[in-house]
């Protein structure tokens, strides 16, 4: 397999971030070289899965709350990106053969390693059962997503197109439960906030301290490099 290129990037707009991930997928398609991009978000941004109904959210109302809206190229449900480190792992699909569930499990290996290095007691979710009606990605883990004592810590989504696999995920360092509740349950934000606190956790809670984004990016870069048999190269370092 080709060397893994690791790109550390700063905070960008939601539109830029999604366009950048797609542009990197095109590069991987043309040169066959896998890439790991680690980045953040300039403004609070709600991303919708590619098949998710847009009319579930009012753009005008989101704007009033200072939240941008963007659509992801990957599936899944809506995620509020705010105080987090996001990863995008892009690879020729032939390098990770198998179905969606098996590749989720494989990519979970470096994610688990990085989070354990940071001090989180993480495990993998099992059968999620019947999906609920909630539009919120963090209200229910999918197969092999990462959780702490039954509370979802990292939400990932995947797409395959023209021979390229793109998986990206949101690792919140802090969760603004109140803002999530205002977005997803405007009629009962207090009740929704309490329910979400039972189902989702951020990294600061999981490790009992506030790790920096640079520390988290370093741990992810090391873990992915080791998982990729140590064959990696950093090609940028503009994290802020």
Image: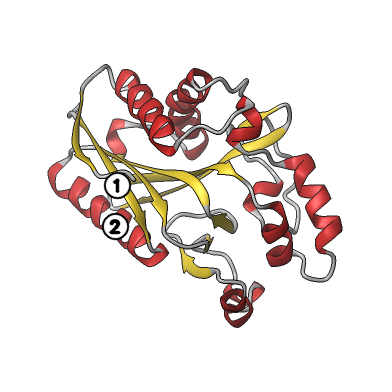
Question: Where residue 237 sits: x, y (%)?
Answer: 23, 40
The structure residue drawn at horizontal position 60% and vertical position 34%, both measured from the top left corner, is 204
| Residue 20 numbered tag | 2
Which of 120/127 is in front?
A: 120
The structure residue drawn at horizontal position 58% and vertical position 34%, both measured from the top left corner, is 203
Place residue 110 in its image quadrant.
Answer: top left
Q: In this view, does 89 lie to the left or right of 46?
A: left
State whether residue 106 appears in this view: yes
Which of 22/100 is in front?
A: 22
**Disc 1 residue crowd, few under 14, some 14–19, many 20+, Cα 10 Å:** some
State whether residue 169 appears in this view: no
Residue at the far bottom in the pictured view = 60
Between disc 2 and disc 1, whose residue precedes? 1
| 3D distance between C-alphas at marks 2 and 1 | 11 Å
Residue where numbered disc 1 is placed: 9
Place residue 18 in its image quadrant.
Answer: bottom left
- Circles 2, 1 touching at the beta carbon (< 8 Å): yes
Q: Is residue 152 above or below residue 191?
A: above
Which of 14/143 is in front?
A: 14
The structure residue drawn at horizontal position 56% and vertical position 71%, both measured from the top left corner, is 66
Disc 1 is placed on an element classified as strand
Question: Where residue 159 sits: x, y (%)?
Answer: 42, 50
The structure residue drawn at horizontal position 49% and vertical position 28%, both measured from the top left corner, is 108
């Amino acid at each position: 397999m080709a060397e893994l290129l690791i790109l550390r990037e700063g905070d960008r707009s939601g539109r830029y971030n999604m366009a950048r991930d797609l542009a990197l997928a095109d590069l991987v398609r043309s040169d066959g070289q896998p890439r790991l991009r680690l980045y953040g978000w300039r403004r609070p941004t709600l991303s919708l899965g590619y098949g998710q109904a847009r009319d579930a959210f009012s753009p005008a109302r989101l704007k009033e709350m200072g939240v941008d809206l963007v659509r992801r190229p990957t599936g899944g449900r809506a995620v509020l990106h705010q105080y987090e480190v996001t990863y995008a792992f892009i690879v020729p699909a032939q390098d990770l053969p198998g179905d969606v569930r098996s590749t989720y499990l494989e990519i979970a290996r470096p994610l688990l390693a990085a989070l354990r290095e940071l001090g989180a007691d993480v495990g993998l979710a099992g059968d999620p059962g019947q999906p609920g009606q909630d539009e919120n990605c963090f209200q229910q883990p999918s197969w092999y997503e990462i959780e702490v004592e039954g509370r979802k810590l990292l939400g990932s989504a995947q797409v395959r197109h023209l021979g390229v696999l793109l998986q990206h995920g949101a690792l919140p360092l802090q969760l603004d439960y109140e803002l999530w509740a205002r977005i997803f349950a405007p009629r009962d934000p207090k009740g929704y906030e309490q329910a979400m606190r039972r189902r989702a956790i951020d990294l600061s809670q999981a490790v009992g301290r506030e790790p920096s984004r640079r520390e988290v990016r370093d741990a992810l870069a090391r873990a992915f490099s080791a998982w990729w048999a140590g064959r990696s190269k950093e090609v940028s370092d503009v994290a802020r």
